[in-house]
Image: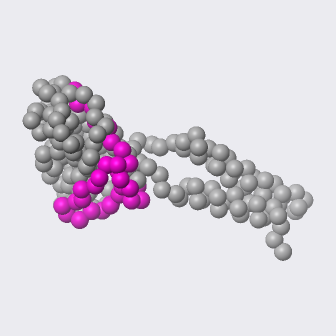
Amino acid sequence: MRTAGFRTAVLGVILFAALSASAKPVTIQFDFFDGGTAHAIGTVVVEDTALPNPTGIGGVFLSVPGPEVLSATITVSGATAGNGTFTNITGFAWDTNGGTLDLSKPLIGQPTPGGPWGPPGNGDFNFFTPAAPGPNGVFPFGLRANHGAANTMILASAIPVQQVPTLSEWPMVLLALLLTAAGFAALRRKRA
């Protein structure tokens, strides 16, 4: 017959595994640069289990916000027009060039069937806004300021950042660890 300590330990391990395996948003920091003064830097938050990875050649266009792309923010600076911070992103172009990208490592240069992912055209990573002065994607990895009327910036980096549990997740993580520890402590007492 299984003891209460054994059941408690198993419950803690199951709870901890469930918390570890659940989908987590991934934040990707990016920088588009025109080679001179214009930059478009920002973040896009994607749901790692919902984002198509790999995509077929040609990729997908995803709504922002949506189940795959939770949010995006872009700050354009140094452009001849269309500078500012934009949160009204409505679309995200995502093409892995047929490969599976590792969302825990820098994306540019990862292998795909057509060559390393990234500019000039092995895949796509781009954003769309409804109107000027927001930036708009004009070709794979090419973002143009002022809704396509100003500086053309090319993706220079796309780096996922490490996520830490939110404040609302910590109590569950601690509960799982405490249940596991209490179960093993009870097992040890019973054996002694």
Q: Residue at x 63, y 49 (%)?
A: 173
Please determine whether, in this image, residue 3 is positioned above or below residue 138.
Answer: below
Where in the figure is residue 136, as x and y percent of width and height?
17, 42
Q: Can residue 46 be seen in this view?
A: yes
Please determine whether, in this image, residue 80 is positioned above or below residue 149.
Answer: above
Where in the figure is residue 123, as x and y percent of width and height?
20, 55
Q: Quick one: which residue is furthest to the bottom in this view? A: 1
Q: Does the magenta stretch include residue 85?
A: no
Q: Quick one: which residue is furthest to the front in this view? A: 131
Which residue is at the front of the view, 114 or 131?
A: 131
Please determine whether, in this image, residue 190 is positioned above or below residue 149.
Answer: below
Please determine whether, in this image, residue 68 is positioned above or below residue 170.
Answer: below
Q: Residue at x 45, y 43 (%)?
A: 162
Q: Which residue is drawn at 84% across and 74% down?
A: 1
Where in the figure is residue 159, as x and y percent of width and height?
33, 42
Q: Quadrant of residue 13?
A: bottom right
Which residue is at the front of the view, 155 or 110?
A: 155
Where in the figure is residue 186, as x and y percent of width and height?
84, 57
Q: Does the magenta stretch include residue 55?
A: yes
What residue range appears in magenta?
48-77
Which residue is at the front of the view, 124 or 187?
A: 124
Say which quadrant the C terminus sits in: bottom right
Q: Residue at x 40, y 53 (%)?
A: 47
